[in-house]
Structure formats: C-alpha cells, structure tokens
Image (tube, rainbow, N blue to C red):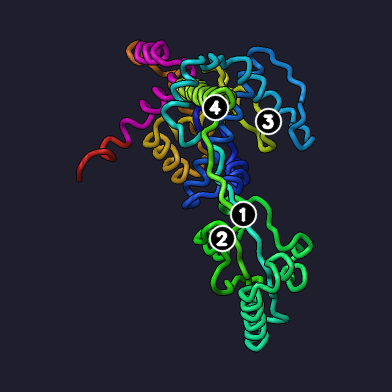
C-alpha cells in the first residue's frame, strides 16, 4: 500500500485520492495538498485526544444531525486545549467606532408593480404583453383608476391581491433590472415606461424610501463580541494545529492512518525496524519526506536488484549493526541524540551511510 507523510502523519495514497474530492482547487496537486493537510490535521487531533484520554459524546447540529464520533473528539480536544480570552468592552467599542458603516440597519424601500406576463416567449406574445402594459400606463395617467386598482384587475403577479404591493424590500430582493428602475424613481413616482424582465413587463411605482440607521453600540456589542471571539478562536486553533504538525514533523511518522482512516502510532525503536517488515515499511514514507535523495537511491537499488525497498532497508540496518566500527557507532549515537525521534534519526544516518559511496557523484556536476 503506497503512502506519503504529511505533517508527520503517514497517509495511504487511496485516502488522499478519496479526500481530494472534497477539496476542489486550481489543480489536482492543490486538491491533493489540501486533502493531505486535512487528513493529517484530523489524525494529529485524534492522536492528541487519545494521549490526554478524552471521551466525547456526539452532539446535534442546528439541523438535528448528529456528529460522528471522530468529529466529537476533534471538537473536544480543541475545546480542551484552546483557551481564548473573551474580548473586553473597550475592544468591542474600538471595533464599533472604527467600522461604523458595518453597524447600520439596511436601507429599505417600499414598492408596487403590475406584471403583464406574455403567454409564451414568441415575439408576437411578448409584443402583445408590451402593448397591454403601455395601455394600462396610459389609463393610469388619465387618472380614472389608481395604481392599486389596476394591479388588482390586471396584474399576473400574486401581489395583485394587495394592489401590487411588494412590501418592504432591500437591495438584492428583486431582479436587477426591476430594482434599478425602481431606485431611480422619487418616492410616489411611477416609471414612465414598462420595464422588461424574464417574468414579463412591469409597471413600477416607488412608494417610499427608508434610510438605514446606525445601530446603537448596545445592540451591536454582542455581535461584535461573538465575531472577535470566533476570530480569536480560529487563529488559536490554527496555531495549535501548526504546533502539533511541527512536533510531528520533527519526530517523523508519529501517527499512521490505515486505509479506513483509523489512527495508530507510527514510531518504534531501531530493533523493530530490523526484525519487523511492517515497521520498516512504515519508515519508507517518512524517509521520502525527510531525505528525498536517499529515498531515490533506495528505489533505484530496489529497481536494479528486484528486492523490495523495505527488505533493502532492513538489510542495510542489519548490515550496519553487524559491521559498524566505533566511529560509525559514535556518529549514529550522536545523530540519535540530536533527533527528536531517535529511531528515525538513526535510520536516516544508516541509509545515508549505505548510499554515500555508490552515489557520490549524483549531487555534483558532470
């Protein structure tokens, strides 16, 4: 099973491909990168939840859907490990004073219309509806009927029942061509010509405009507090995950996802990698991330010899243990002490020693 290491988490290729579908991006590589980050983040958080012994009960969202057991643990570990100080009254006030335009009630307008809907999209039917709208506009100008009376008798919109009234609206509530024509009128004015939309022909009347008003700080304060607290929590959560990832990257593959997405520890001791084929296999993705050149040499030798990379790695470790001199052991011990994960630091040193002779010219000029 091919795997890659992301943020110190070993992830099967199949999981990356599956998760990438949930992360549309500018390229396949971008989607795969986002998928790897998401899977690694989840694994690190679940591993941390296990380390501190968390147990979490799934909760229901606003739509009554129950979160998964994994989602409950991720939520619980973030809640347990992240502490955000609520914003002060003064901080909220500074936001309010500095961004007053954001804390206004929206401008509203009241309007009415008469819709004349063509019987079909045929040119003749559209022209007939246009002619009917113009006739009604002339009738309105004569003063024999009010706008509301004509709407009740002739409009093809359900608003006919209320004399064509559309009630209180704000920008964006109506199709653009109708709204733009309405907002170009003065309160009480009727548009001089019918306006066409995908629904038909409209006779339009602007009843009144209601300007937006500044919201008092007392009303805006709670909204500001929730926004600042949410933003601070998001920043703290991101930093927390980065810290987990940095710690994991320093240790190599500290966690492993199986093909179903389950999390298990990924570290081991040097002896494990000599005798345990599975343990050696887990080290290879880490080596690919930590030292691509050495990993490439290993793959080249595997291709030339027909021996699987994991077997070659185990053989290299066994050969080193059996034949290393004092100087080589000193270098190995030094590397292990300086590395966050001694076993993996030792493995890297052994593999570099193994290939240093046969590939001396690979990094130089020709």
Q: Which residue is mark 4?
A: 216
Q: How many marks?
A: 4
159 sits left or right of 127 in the view: right
Q: Residue at 63% of width from left, 70% of height from top?
A: 202
In the rendered image, the quadrant that contains the N terminus is top right
Q: Which residue is mark 3?
A: 262
How crowded is the residue under tag 3: few (<14 C-alpha within 10 Å), some, or many (20+)? few
Q: Residue at 46% of width from left, 36% of height from top?
A: 101
Residue 198 higher or lower than 101, as above or below: below
Q: Are marks 3 and 1 in contact (CB under 8 Å)?
A: no
Magenta: predominant secondary structure element? Answer: helix
Q: Are marks 1 and 2 in contact (CB under 8 Å)?
A: yes
Q: From the viewer's side, name the closer residue of 126 and 65.
A: 126
Report the span colored magenta.
Answer: 329-358
Mark 4 to mark 2 CA distance (whole Å)? 29 Å
Q: Position of residue 106 (x, y in %)?
A: 56, 43
Q: From the viewer's side, name the closer residue of 238 and 19.
A: 238
Q: Are marks 3 and 2 in contact (CB under 8 Å)?
A: no
Quadrant in the rendering for residue 16: top right
Q: Which mark is residue 173?
A: 1
Q: Which mark is residue 179?
A: 2
Specify which label sits upstream in the sequence, 4 or 2.
Answer: 2
């Amino acid at each position: 099973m091919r795997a890659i290491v992301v943020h110190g988490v070993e992830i099967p290729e199949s999981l990356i491909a599956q998760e990438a579908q949930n992360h549309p991006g500018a390229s396949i590589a971008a989607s795969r990168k986002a998928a790897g980050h998401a899977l690694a983040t989840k694994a690190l958080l679940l591993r941390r939840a296990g380390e501190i012994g968390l147990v979490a009960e799934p909760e229901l969202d606003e739509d009554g859907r129950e979160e998964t057991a994994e989602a409950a643990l991720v939520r619980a570990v973030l809640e347990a490990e992240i502490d955000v100080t609520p914003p002060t009254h003064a901080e909220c006030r500074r936001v309010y004073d500095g961004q007053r335009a954001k804390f206004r009630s929206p401008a509203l307008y009241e309007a009415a219309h008469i819709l004349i809907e063509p019987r079909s999209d045929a040119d003749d039917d559209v022209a007939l509806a246009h002619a009917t709208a113009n006739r009604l506009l002339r009738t309105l100008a004569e003063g024999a009927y009010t706008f509301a009376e004509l709407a009740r008798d002739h409009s093809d919109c359900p608003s006919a029942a209320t004399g064509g009234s559309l009630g209180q609206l704000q920008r964006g509530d109506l199709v653009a061509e109708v709204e733009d024509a309405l907002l170009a009128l003065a309160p009480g004015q009727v548009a001089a010509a019918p306006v066409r939309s995908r629904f038909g022909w409209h006779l339009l009347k602007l009843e009144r405009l209601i300007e937006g008003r500044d919201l008092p700080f007392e009303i805006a304060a709670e909204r500001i507090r929730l926004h600042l607290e949410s933003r601070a929590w998001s920043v703290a959560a991101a930093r927390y995950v980065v810290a987990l990832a940095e710690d994991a990257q320093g240790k190599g593959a500290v966690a492993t996802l199986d093909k179903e997405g389950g999390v298990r520890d990924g570290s081991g001791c040097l002896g494990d990698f000599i005798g345990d084929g599975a343990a050696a296999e887990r080290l290879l993705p880490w080596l690919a991330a930590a030292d691509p050149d050495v990993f490439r040499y290993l793959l080249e030798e595997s291709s030339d010899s027909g021996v699987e990379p994991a077997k070659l790695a185990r053989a290299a470790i066994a050969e080193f243990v059996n034949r290393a001199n004092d100087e080589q052991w000193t270098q190995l011990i030094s590397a292990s002490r300086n590395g966050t994960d001694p076993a993996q630091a030792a493995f890297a040193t052994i593999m570099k020693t193994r290939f240093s002779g046969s590939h001396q010219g690979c990094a130089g000029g020709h």
